[in-house]
Amino acid sequence: MPDRVRAGTVEIVADNLDSPTVSEVEVRTGDLAVVLGEKENLIEGVSGSFTVDLPQGQYVVDCPGALQGRWPLTATGKPPAGDT
């Protein structure tokens, strides 16, 4: 999972390989107050995706029920390191 993406339309892809406690993934504002996009019904063995428009800023990827439930995500105006 990248911790930096280019600002704009971002596709979020989630695979629930074997976790019976996780059923969704969300992208939230950095303060967690607003869900900007989500994919629900990601029960064990199911994959899914969604797109979200992210202006430059700080966000959180939230997977309720996961061992690590939250990851920081930064949308930048520049390509992530290694991209051209």
Image: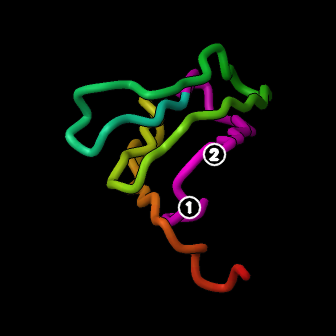
Q: Position of residue 44 (x, y in %)?
A: 71, 26
What span is colored magenta in the figure? 1-24
Amino acid of disc 1:
Val
Mark 1 or mark 2: which comes first in sequence?
1
Q: Residue at x 37, y 45 (%)?
A: 60
Label pair 1/2, CB-CB below 8 angstroms: yes
Viewport quadrant of the C terminus: bottom right
* Mark 2 crowd level (few <14, some 14–19, many ≥20, 10 Å Cα): some
Disc number placed over residue 5 in the picture, else none: 1
Image-based side of 50 in relation to 37, left or right: right
State yes or no: residue 14 in magenta. Answer: yes
Per the image, the residue denoted by label 2 is 10
For image coordinates 48% across by 44% down, the residue present is: 54
Instruction: Determine whether, in the image, residue 67 is placed left or right of residue 25.
Output: left
Image quarter (top left, top right, bottom left or bottom right) of the N terminus: bottom right
Of residues 53 and 72, the one drawn nearer to the viewer in this rendering: 53
Could you tell me residue 17's position as x and y percent? 75, 39
